[in-house]
Image: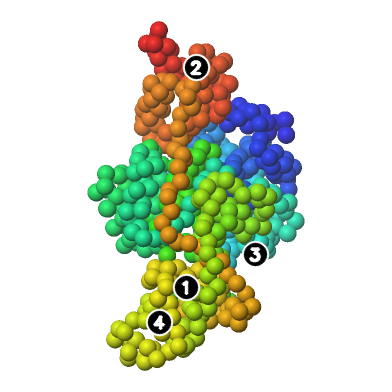
């Protein structure tokens, strides 16, 4: 571990490991296998990069993210690490050059797509090469129960079969107990040490609200809190992605659409702009985001409810990787549930798979409807306990008002039963409210004992009651009957009067004072800060890399506070290893010297 600590400091510019990085690295350097669950931004990459540099041979990293390999390799090369990649973006000549470098022992790390790795040509090449380790990134992709399944990952058990003495490390930020078990089984990691670093991201503020006018809600959120910040807006459909991006452009934002239906060159260009420019809003489907290393994403917004808690956790985790305050903001409605249920019913999965996905959808809706701390609920889903409410989610900052909804719930359940469990929310509300509309008369529903018994609540209040009964498992949405609400077994006690229920009030609430922007500390000179950022931007453009690859904001802030004026002082900054000291130290010290001379 002495060598590992030396690599951490001289190559990566950090003084100490974050637990359990040291234990993981020690395990892999010693030749052991490891399964690592660590939150986004927790430092997973160091867990295989440092052992790859400490062990003889080349570390091989299997990643599904072809579009991002170039940026990962560029970042390592900035540190003086001999890194390259093998994927379908290379022409035959370029691929042969990488293979030759590998065979000659001139690479420290090789990133490779799973479909390339499993080719016999590649396996033969690796068998004739000194391999330090195999790192399987985004390991949840191997799980058919997971939210990002990749068929190519199913073949990765061959690593243990063909290379039984080479240590393997599988890494993911998102996996519940069932997914973890499948990763272990499918990758033959039964003897691997397991490291679960915790799922909490305390710098992220979770906020979930009902949809009223989703676009205007989003616009207010962006203008009030993130007018010049980089962020991601997730939408459920490709069309909505494009329409929303265009609308945001018209509102003055630097917004780009991203979905799997776009030409691959356009996707690559937009992704590069998001990584390298500082205030791009990417409006995307779930096709975007896995493996994004941009540290200064200040918000992730959802205009539609994700289909699982795992998806929500992973997508929101793309915000605030630098540890600074960030927002996870979402609006949702019952229509989201109906749309997701429809997509599920139309999928080609087995009945067992559909049941599992329905359970996950219910858990996601439950997170939206909860009246207690959202972070506690989110972490509990991943079998992690948070002893006290977090104080940094909407339900903690503004406790949710509730009301005794027992009688209203019984009326709602009764009207579902009396109408034959064949109708959707709108019709049921019309019956309760005593409507004399055409459909009411067509089915003689004005003759039902439940007709007109709900005039004490307005349409929105009744919709809220039905939505919460679905969320809590008293009702379900039957897509085979076009969104009809049906009774669940759980509702019997409530209908009989043996159970009471508290419902949340959905009346508009005064917005809490939000402070999630990356505000500069008081002791930082803004003029020096902007001069250092301009120097970073210039260097990044010259080399065609994102600004954060040169230095993270945290390092620039340390420059502002410490004002290093010698290479020795500059080398003590966080994130400054020997390579970056030699490459950039003089340029940034010069900016500091000019600033000090100007302020005299």
Find numbered disc 4 in the image and state the secondary structure of the residue it sits on. loop
Horizontal side of 425 relative to 37 (left or right) equals left
Circles 4 and 2 in contact, beta carbons < 8 Å:
no
**Which is in the foreground here, disc 4 or disc 3?**
4
- Disc 3/disc 1 C-alpha distance (Å): 31 Å
Q: Name the residue under label 2.
A: 563
**Which is in the foreground here, disc 3 or disc 1?**
1
Q: Mark 4 points at which residue?
A: 452
Residue in the image at 37% along x and 88% along y: 446
Q: Which of marks 1 and 2 is nearer the N terminus?
A: 1
Give x and y (percent) for residue 506.
Answer: 45, 61
**Which is in the foreground here, disc 1 or disc 4?**
4
**Which is in the foreground here, disc 4 or disc 2?**
4
Q: Which of marks 4 and 2 is nearer the N terminus?
A: 4
Find numbered disc 1 in the image and state the secondary structure of the residue it sits on. helix
Give x and y (percent) for residue 317.
Answer: 52, 49
Q: Mark 1 points at which residue?
A: 466
Q: Which residue lies furthest to the left in this view?
A: 250
- Disc 2/disc 3 C-alpha distance (Å): 50 Å
Give x and y (percent) for residue 247.
Answer: 27, 53
Taking depth in this image into account, of 107 and 225 the one nearest to the observer is 225
Q: Name the residue under label 3.
A: 178
Q: Residue furthest front?
A: 456
């Amino acid at each position: 571990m002495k060598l590992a600590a030396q690599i951490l400091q001289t190559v990566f510019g950090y003084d100490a490991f974050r637990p359990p990085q040291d234990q993981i690295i020690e395990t892999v350097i010693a030749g052991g296998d490891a399964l690592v669950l660590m939150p986004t931004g927790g430092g997973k990459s160091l867990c295989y990069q440092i052992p790859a540099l400490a062990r003889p041979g080349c570390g091989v990293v299997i990643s599904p993210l072809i579009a991002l390999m170039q940026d990962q390799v560029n970042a390592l090369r900035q540190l003086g690490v001999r890194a390259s990649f093998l994927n379908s973006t290379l022409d035959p000549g370029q691929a042969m050059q990488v293979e030759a470098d590998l065979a000659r022992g001139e690479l420290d790390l090789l990133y490779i797509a799973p479909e390339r790795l499993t080719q016999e040509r590649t396996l033969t090449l690796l068998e004739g090469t000194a391999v330090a380790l195999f790192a399987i990134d985004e390991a949840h992709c191997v799980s058919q129960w997971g939210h990002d399944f990749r068929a190519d990952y199913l073949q990765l058990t061959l690593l243990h079969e063909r290379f039984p003495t080479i240590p393997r490390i599988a890494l993911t930020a998102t996996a519940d107990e069932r997914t973890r078990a499948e990763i272990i089984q499918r990758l033959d990691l039964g003897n691997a040490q397991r490291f679960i670093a915790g799922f909490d991201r305390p710098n992220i503020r979770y906020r979930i609200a009902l949809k009223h006018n989703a676009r205007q809600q989003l616009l207010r959120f962006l203008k009030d809190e993130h007018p010049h910040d980089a962020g991601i807006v997730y939408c459920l459909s490709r069309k909505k992605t494009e329409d929303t991006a265009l609308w945001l452009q018209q509102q003055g934002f630097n917004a780009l659409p991203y979905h799997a239906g776009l030409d691959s060159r356009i996707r690559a260009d937009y992704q590069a702009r998001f990584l390298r420019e500082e205030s791009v809003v990417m409006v995307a489907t779930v096709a975007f985001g896995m493996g994004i290393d941009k540290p200064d994403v200040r918000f992730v917004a959802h205009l539609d409810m994700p289909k699982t808690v795992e998806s929500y956790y992973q997508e929101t985790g793309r915000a605030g990787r630098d540890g600074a305050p960030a927002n996870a903001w979402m609006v949702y409605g019952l229509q989201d549930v109906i749309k997701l249920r429809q997509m599920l019913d139309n999928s080609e999965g087995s009945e067992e798979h559909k049941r599992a996905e329905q359970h996950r959808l219910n858990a996601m809706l439950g997170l939206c409807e909860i009246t207690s701390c959202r972070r506690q609920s989110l972490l509990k889903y991943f079998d992690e306990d948070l002893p006290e409410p977090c104080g940094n989610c909407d339900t903690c900052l503004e406790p949710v008002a509730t009301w005794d909804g027992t009688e209203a719930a019984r009326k709602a359940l009764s009207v579902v039963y009396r109408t034959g469990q064949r109708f959707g929310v709108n019709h049921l509300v019309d019956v309760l409210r005593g409507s004399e509309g055409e459909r009411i008369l067509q089915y003689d529903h004005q003759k039902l004992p439940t007709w007109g018994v709900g005039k004490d609540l307005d349409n929105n209040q009744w919709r809220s009651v039905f939505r919460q009964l679905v969320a809590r498992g008293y009702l379900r949405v039957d897509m085979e009957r076009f969104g009809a609400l049906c009774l669940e077994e759980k509702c019997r006690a409530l209908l009989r009067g043996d159970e009471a229920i508290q419902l949340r009030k959905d009346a508009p609430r005064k917005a809490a004072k939000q402070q999630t922007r990356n505000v500069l500390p008081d002791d930082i000179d803004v003029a020096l800060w902007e001069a250092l950022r301009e120097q970073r931007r210039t260097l990044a453009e010259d080399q065609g890399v994102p600004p954060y690859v040169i230095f993270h904001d945290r390092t620039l802030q340390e420059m502002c506070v410490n004002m290093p004026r010698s290479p020795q002082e500059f080398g003590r900054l966080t994130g400054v290893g020997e390579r970056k000291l030699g490459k950039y130290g003089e340029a940034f010290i010069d900016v500091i010297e000019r600033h000090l001379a100007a302020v005299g």
